[in-house]
Image (tube, rainbow, N blue to C red):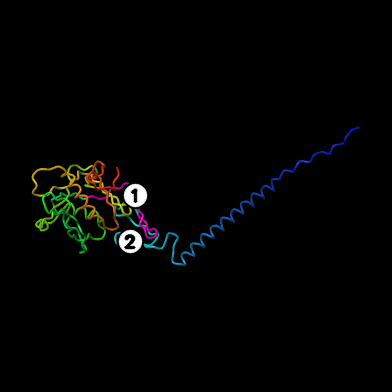
Amino acid sequence: MTESQTPSTSPTPPSPADETKSRKLLIIVSIVAIVAICAAVTLAVVLLMSQGQTPIGNKQCTYNGKVYNPGDSFPADDNCNSCGCTNGEVVCTLIACEAPGVTVQPTTSLAPSPTTGEGLPVYFGKPVEETDYNTLATVERAEPAEGTSVYTYLLGKLFSGPTAEEKTSGIVPVASVSGDSNCSGKDYQFVRTVSVLTVNFCRDLAGLQNPGISGAYAGITLAMNSRLFMAFEKTLSVEGVTTLVIKDKDGNCFAQDAGVNTACSE
């Protein structure tokens, strides 16, 4: 006797039309999800702005004496990098730039710069004895005119040294630059990043010995270079700068062996 068998039934594969419908439905769902997300983000921004806020904060920034709103962009001091205002904080790019330098002789006065009549402090030495390299004196110099970099201006004043009248009161210069330049004839280049000012010297930088001393003594170079850094640090701590870094023409941290310039790294 022959047994009868029921033939098995295979699932019917989806037709091309069904597959097309599925793809269209998936695309529609994705588009709806994206639109919903965009709407939510837009609503959040509108609500923040209606409350006097912005997505990047609502605090203004002050840079070089000017006030900027959140989201504003503006050039950095070196006329090369750019800065932006983010919730009260100035953030600047840091790229390799050739910032303007001023070629001066340490004992030669610069031609007077245009000024606004307001004063800026500049620091020099005022030793109470021949071996004193710790005492500094403050003198006032008129501010540069608008558009002049305050750091270029102040570095020029530091190398120009005290006036003849100031010298009669015991104030002495603290720095000199000499030798050939390794950056197209400039004395230095500088870059500012938020609160850090880095000055890279292109010539030989050295502290100056107090007048009246004949010959050298142990530790005098460290003392001279330490005073130079302290005077530069105090003078250049303007317009939001809180940290100064000085590097010599070979890229080494200047006077770090004297216990100063500690923020510098090679």
* Residue name at image x 80 percent, y 39 percent: 8
Residue 94's disc number? 1
Relative depth, front residue between 237 and 132: 132
Residue 153 at x, y = what percent? 22, 55
Q: Is residue 138 left or right of residue 264?
A: left
Residue 178 in magenta? no
Mark 2, residue position: 62
Above or below, comparing residue 122 to residue 2 in the picture: below
* Residue name at image x 89 percent, y 33 percent: 2
Residue 138 at x, y = what percent? 18, 58
Secondary structure state at the residue bearing disc 2? strand
Residue 192's disc number? none
Chain part drawn in magenta: 83-101
Relative depth, front residue between 161 and 16: 161
- Residue 6 at least partly seen: yes
Q: Quadrant of residue 56?
A: bottom left
Looking at the rendered image, the quarter that the N terminus falls into is top right
